[in-house]
Image (spheres, rainbow, N blue to C red):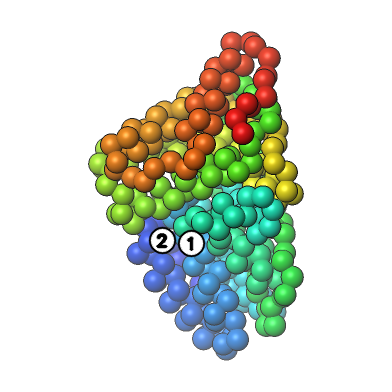
Amino acid sequence: MSLDQSIERFDATVSSLGPIRRLVSDALARWNCDALVDDAVLCASELASNAVLHTRVPFELAIGKIHDGVRIEVTDQRPQELPALVPSTGLAADITSQGTTGRGLQIISSIAERWGVTTHAEHKVVWVELHPGGTADRTDPIVVEVEPPLTDPDRVHLTLLSLPVRTAVANGMHLDGLVREVQLGVADVEPDDVSRMYALLDDSATVRLEARRRSLQAGSLEEPRFDLELDTSYPALLAVAELYDLIGGLVSERRTGALPEGVPELRAWLHDEAARQLQGEEPRPCPLP
């Protein structure tokens, strides 16, 4: 990024989005980049919204002048929580279109000249570059791993066979929607349960997000089912199980909306299958439709 830049740190709350939009608008006005204001504000808002939703820790937003355009960066301390691009085509597209989250990166990929993610051992940077005229083509993210994220040395391997794409995508979308409802104060969830949910989200991030990435990828390729190879840790798997138990309790108490069709059965099967494989048994295909 050039020396002509603006950098500020923000709390991971929806109230930060207004100041972020002003920061970007003021910077572009200072650089006489009026033609980029709308796209830049939109991209910055979407990057920041992702940080608020998925990391829930303070983050840094920087905007800098590059040639005739601008580069926007959001840096957070959650390198393991990589953004997943929601497909706009394929079997899972209709599921994601009904969700309240997940379309921000679709917007960014359709208007950015370039965008991507750079991960370090203890932080990651999600960035966007914009130039006058934009691009009519959908751009894929540039992913660079400078240093591998820190991992738990107690690793386990799971092979999950023939997972149904639609249900797997719905599973991830429901969880994102619930977190969003909690952040907006819509869901009737006790503060202690909110704190526990956030802790479990962090502890289970590596396994959850890899499963979400693969389900979305399979959906974009029109695959009805997919296999998932997971290298994770026992604590992460335990966090997933506890997270699903917590959400199931909230649903049964009607503190949040019902789970999508098939999701309870998928979560129960995943729990049982992981337990089987941890005991040394061979993988078996998921029998759910």
- Amino acid on which the number 2 mark rests in the picture: Phe
Element under label 2?
A: strand
Q: Which mark is residue 48?
A: 1
Place of residue 139 in the rendered image (x, y in percent of width and height, measured from the top left): 72, 64
Density class for disc 2 (Cα within 10 Å; few <14, some 14-19, many ≥20) is some
Residue appearing at x 36%, y 46% in the figure = 257
Where is the N terminus found, in terms of image quarters? bottom right
Which residue position is annotated with label 2?
A: 10
- Amino acid on which the number 1 mark rests in the picture: Ala
Place of residue 261 in the rendered image (x, y in percent of width and height, measured from the top left): 49, 40
Density class for disc 1 (Cα within 10 Å; few <14, some 14-19, many ≥20) is many
Residue toward you, 164 or 119:
164
Q: Earlier in the sequence, mark 2 or mark 1?
A: 2
Residue toward you, 203 or 26:
203
Snapshot quadrant of residue 3: bottom right
Residue appearing at x 49%, y 55% in the figure = 99
Place of residue 180 in the rendered image (x, y in percent of width and height, measured from the top left): 40, 53
- Distance from disc 2 to disc 1, alpha carbons, whole Å, reads 9 Å
| For residue 264, side relative to residue 96 (left or right) | left
Residue toward you, 46 or 287:
287
Where is the C terminus found, in terms of image quarters? top right
Element under label 1?
A: helix
Q: Is residue 59 above or below residue 196?
A: below
